Amino acid sequence: MEKINRPYRVLVGKPGLDGHDRGAKFIARALRDEGFEVIYTGIRRTPDEIAAAAIQEDVAAIGLSSLSGAHLKLFPEVVKALERRGVTDIPVIGGGVIPEDDIPTLIAAGLTEIFTPGTPADTIINAFAEACRKHFAAQGDNH
């Protein structure tokens, strides 16, 4: 894994009523260990709260976690909440207990990547790094 020069700032959020955050905290720590600056919103946040925090914190990517089965509703709502605020350049990555059949729907709704249980942490970290690179490249900053 290549260490980044300047820390990418990312947000990890738990939308909805899902109170299980062990996976989200694991990913947040793994990202931090690789040099990312991580903002963790905590559990039971609305899509609007997550979008507002991402904009306020000026993050380059958002990671969402769901174990409750509400991912088809809540993940796209975060993308829509960003769009309502005029933000279309922050990639949104999802993960959790998500059936394979739901992944194309989530990608079509604007998420960039979806990870399911058992995905190696390095794969997820690399996806965040790539999402951040694309975010900055779209802004003309090679970060």
Image (tube, rainbow, N blue to C red):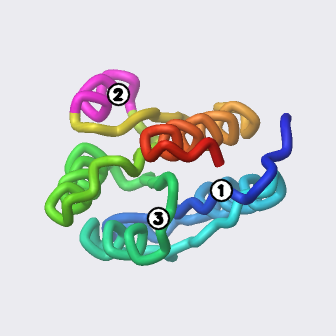
First in residue order: circle 1 vs circle 2? 1
Determine which residue is flagged by label 1. 8
Q: Which amino acid does label 3 sit on?
A: Gly
Number of numbered callouts drawn: 3
Q: Is the magenta stretch mostly helix, strand or loop?
A: helix
Whether residue 95 is visible, yes or no, is no
Q: Which residue is drawn at 42% across and 53% down?
A: 66
* Above or below, comparing residue 14 to residue 80 in the picture: below
Looking at the rendered image, the quarter that the N terminus falls into is: top right
Q: What x and y, as percent, mark residue 16?
A: 31, 67
Mark pair 2, 3: CA separation: 19 Å
Q: Between 19 and 1, which is closer to the camera in this rendering?
A: 1
* Above or below, comparing residue 34 to residue 108 in the picture: below
Determine which residue is flagged by label 2. 103
Dot 2 falls on a residue whose secondary structure is helix
Mark pair 1, 2: CA separation: 26 Å
Q: What x and y, as percent, mark residue 64?
A: 45, 54
Q: Between 102 and 90, which is closer to the camera in this rendering?
A: 90
